[in-house]
Image: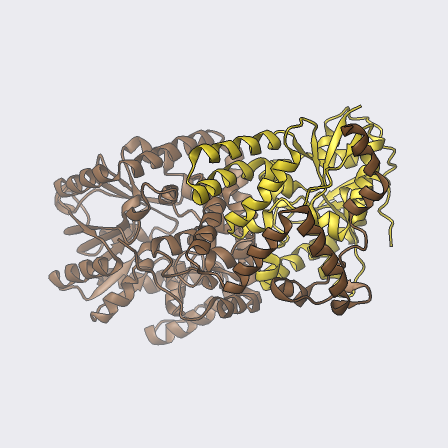
Chain colours: A brown, B yellow
């Protein structure tokens, strides 16, 4: 089934310009992503055993995806025997409907959420609010962007594009509506303290908690959340109803597989040995003595299973650590919102068009990658991100998704250069015509595909004598001598 | 005395032929006998990276036909183009031939021919670095150089020692740029089609070079001319001098050109 992802109505050119013009965001993202990348290198150097665990973890994830059908059955039946309810949702729409109907059944009014990219993907908040529910994000970063009516700019650090001053201003506005004292400074501890007090009230009023899921263990029916703020512990224990919304690809077969992978999101994403909180959801209060009265797990496909048994299957191993974003040069320049959907950086470039069959983000493979391969080096799950980006570019050519003029340029350029005669002919013509485009001995303009280059850069003109022409004039005899 | 075949690359051939001449000088001082198959054109990376597989395959087939049937080392004047031939050609030709002709046998034939050619390809500084550390290139390096290691040399060829060691052996002092592992934004035709992002990345790289210059770096040196043309073109447009030099130029002692 083809997935459905949110889509920013602004075209790439506008999103890109908004990103490039936002110097605060670029500075903040630059600092954050560098700090994460340095931290990652340090933490792996300190704990070399984790490299071995990572490798085995990759195998475990690949195996899980290969056996996904049976793991889904096993997981669902374990959840049920633990006293929970497991539901399958084929599309984003079905997933939202499932959560809405759970909320209706339990007469829910207020929903608190812990951080989940999947609920962003299916636009759950919008769906629940449309049904008259109040939805509150409790992860600090998500809380900040919910106040700003924005979407996450980074998979792991949703408010990475905001600095402390901007956050303080948002909280000051929030304090007025909530009738609370505003934060007294923009110190990180003061801002955090404000959010903590503000959210404590909501936790106690909430009827339903919604979480994502970092891992689902098929043999035990356990959902595992890794967070850094402890908010997930409150979301999973205080409200009377708990709903876990997770992608079908989050399953691993065994508890042992989980132990290999549990440190990987934090180690690779933020350079920390383990996230501060690891929350295990094993069932409702009736079966595990504490927690919510009812627990539901909604397993969402939304275009994922289509990728199985294709060259793109390894994409389903993604643990959403964000390491590829942190090293991506384009991401650092334009920020997460420029990608126009939920997932940004290299994984977003690959997943957005794949999950939606090019319905959303078809431009991304062409515009958001310099082919530097830094993401491949960074990905702990060894996903062939640059290879996939090339494949998606090839797919665009096959589907005629590029401008006809661009395709014509490659068509003729390669055909002419595929013979030495054509190559030399093209250079002779370039020498004849380039006078029109020169200033002070430099090329400053050019027509066609090369036009973009000259918007910001010069170029030396085509040499009056190429290297090979020089060689033939001076050294041509050497080759002939050897061949005779 | 080894014989080598020069893989000039289209960018050197067309836009900076002096790099090719410098490479010949250095290789001959190194004691190599240099040949240059004059039928070579372009490796096709520009089309491959843009997703134009059939177009890239046309150029790849031509490259293979020019260079096959001979086990003389092929010395490439670009890390990125070397990576293209060594690491992308076999799969490119296999897939393109299957797509176009539907024949697995023919596809495997082309892949095997590409692999045979790829085995002989070595990047220029890698070739020179293979010899004994004190191999005399006759270079008297005095300056401090800022090195830009191209992404494909670093991550596809997985070459991180060269050209740094080679330059240091010849007396140069080599400094790394801040954020040296970040792409300069060239990316082949990405620099044309997505020039805004490409230029933002160039400016970040040039900012790092400015800091290196303040620390005494005289030139910005790389094994990859694509990156250098992009960065030099940006500086020229901003009204500055061109401080970029290919490794072959500094080793030849020809870095002081105007």
Q: Nearer the viewer, residue A417 or B227?
A: A417
- Pinpoint residue A460: horizontal percent, then vertical percent: 76, 58
Q: Quadrant of residue A31?
A: bottom right
- The extreme bottom residue here reads A176
Residue farthest toward the front in the current orientation of the protein? A484
Q: Position of residue A477 (x, y in %)?
A: 83, 35
Question: Would you say A132 lies left or right of B98 here?
Answer: left
The reply to whether residue B68 is visible in this rendering is yes
Q: Is residue A383 left or right of residue A369?
A: left
Query: Is residue B171 shown to the viewer in this render?
Result: no
What residue is drawn where x is 84% and y is 47%? B255
Q: Quadrant of the N terminus of chain B?
A: top right
Foreground residue among A329 and A4: A4
Q: Tell me the residue at 17%/64% (across/down).
A: A108
Asked if residue A10 is positioned above or below residue A290 in the image, the reply reads: below
Q: Residue at x 30, y 44 (%)?
A: A249
Q: Is residue A342 left or right of residue A292?
A: right
B84 in relation to A235, above or below: above
- Give the camera-side residue of A347 and B22: B22
Q: Position of residue A131 (x, y in %)?
A: 20, 69
């Amino acid at each position: 089934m083809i997935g459905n992802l949110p889509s920013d109505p602004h075209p790439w050119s506008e999103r890109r310009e908004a990103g490039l013009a936002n110097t605060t965001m670029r500075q903040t993202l630059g600092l954050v992503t560098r700090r994460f990348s340095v931290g990652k290198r340090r933490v792996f150097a300190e704990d070399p055993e984790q490299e071995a665990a990572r490798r085995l973890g990759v195998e475990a994830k690949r195996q899980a995806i290969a056996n996904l059908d049976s793991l889904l059955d096993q997981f669902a039946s374990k959840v049920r025997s633990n006293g929970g309810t497991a539901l399958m949702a084929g599309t984003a729409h079905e997933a939202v409907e499932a959560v809405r109907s759970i909320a209706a059944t339990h007469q829910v009014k207020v929903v608190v959420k812990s951080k989940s990219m999947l609920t962003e993907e299916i636009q759950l908040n919008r769906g629940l609010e449309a049904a008259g529910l109040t939805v509150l994000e409790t992860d600090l970063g998500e809380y900040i962007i919910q106040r700003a009516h924005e979407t996450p700019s980074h998979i792991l650090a949703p408010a990475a594009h905001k600095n402390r001053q901007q956050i303080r201003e948002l909280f000051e506005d929030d304090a007025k509506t909530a009738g609370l004292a505003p934060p007294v400074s923009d110190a990180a501890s003061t801002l955090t303290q404000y959010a903590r007090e503000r959210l404590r009230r909501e936790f106690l009023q909430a009827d339903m908690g919604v979480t994502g899921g970092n891992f689902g263990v098929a043999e035990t029916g356990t959902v595992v959340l890794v967070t850094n703020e402890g908010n997930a512990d409150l979301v999973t224990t205080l409200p009377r109803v708990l709903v876990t919304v997770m992608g079908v690809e989050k399953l691993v077969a065994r508890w042992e597989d989980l132990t290999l992978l549990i440190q990987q999101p934090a180690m690779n994403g933020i350079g920390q040995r383990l996230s501060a909180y690891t929350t295990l959801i094993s069932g409702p209060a009736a079966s595990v003595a504490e927690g919510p009265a009812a627990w539901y797990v909604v397993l969402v496909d939304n275009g994922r299973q289509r990728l199985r048994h294709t060259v793109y299957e390894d994409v389903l191993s993604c643990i959403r650590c964000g390491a590829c974003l942190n090293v991506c040069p384009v991401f650092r320049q334009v920020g997460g919102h420029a990608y126009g959907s939920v997932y940004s950086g290299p994984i977003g470039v690959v997943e957005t068009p794949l999950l939606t069959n090019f319905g959303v983000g078809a431009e991304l493979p062409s515009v958001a990658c310099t082919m530097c391969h830094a993401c491949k080096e960074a990905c702990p799950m060894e996903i062939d991100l640059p290879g996939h980006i090339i494949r998606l570019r090839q797919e665009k050519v096959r589907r005629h998704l590029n401008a006809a003029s661009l395709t014509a340029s490659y068509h003729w350029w390669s055909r002419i250069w595929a013979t030495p005669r054509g190559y030399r002919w093209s250079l002779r013509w370039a020498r004849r015509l380039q006078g029109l485009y020169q200033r002070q001995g430099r090329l400053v303009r050019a027509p066609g595909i090369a036009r973009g280059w000259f918007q910001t850069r010069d170029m030396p003109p085509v040499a009056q004598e190429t290297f090979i022409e020089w060689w033939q004039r001076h050294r041509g005899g050497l080759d002939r001598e050897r061949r005779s | 005395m080894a014989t080598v075949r020069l893989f000039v690359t289209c960018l050197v051939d067309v836009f900076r032929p002096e790099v090719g001449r410098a490479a010949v000088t250095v290789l001959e001082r190194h004691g190599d006998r240099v040949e240059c198959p004059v039928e070579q054109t372009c490796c096709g990376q520009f089309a491959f990276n843009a997703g134009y597989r059939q177009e890239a395959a046309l150029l790849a087939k031509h490259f293979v036909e020019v260079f096959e049937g001979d086990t003389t080392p092929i010395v490439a004047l670009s890390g990125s183009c070397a990576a293209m031939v060594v690491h992308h050609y076999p799969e490119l030709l296999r897939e393109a031939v299957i797509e176009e002709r539907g024949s697995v046998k023919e596809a495997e034939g082309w892949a095997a021919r590409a692999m045979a050619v790829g085995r002989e390809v070595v990047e220029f500084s890698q070739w020179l670095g293979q010899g004994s550390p004190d191999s005399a290139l006759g270079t008297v390096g005095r300056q401090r150089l800022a090195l830009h290691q191209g992404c494909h040399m670093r991550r596809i060829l997985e070459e991180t020692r060269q050209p740094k060691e080679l330059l240091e052996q010849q007396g140069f002092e080599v400094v790394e740029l801040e954020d040296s592992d970040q792409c300069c934004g060239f990316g082949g035709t990405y620099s044309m089609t997505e020039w805004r992002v490409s230029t933002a990345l160039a400016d970040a790289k040039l900012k790092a070079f400015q800091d290196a210059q303040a620390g005494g770096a005289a030139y910005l040196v790389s094994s990859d001319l694509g990156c250098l043309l992009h960065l030099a073109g940006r500086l020229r447009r901003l009204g500055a001098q061109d401080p970029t030099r290919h490794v072959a130029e500094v080793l030849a002692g020809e870095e002081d050109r105007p």
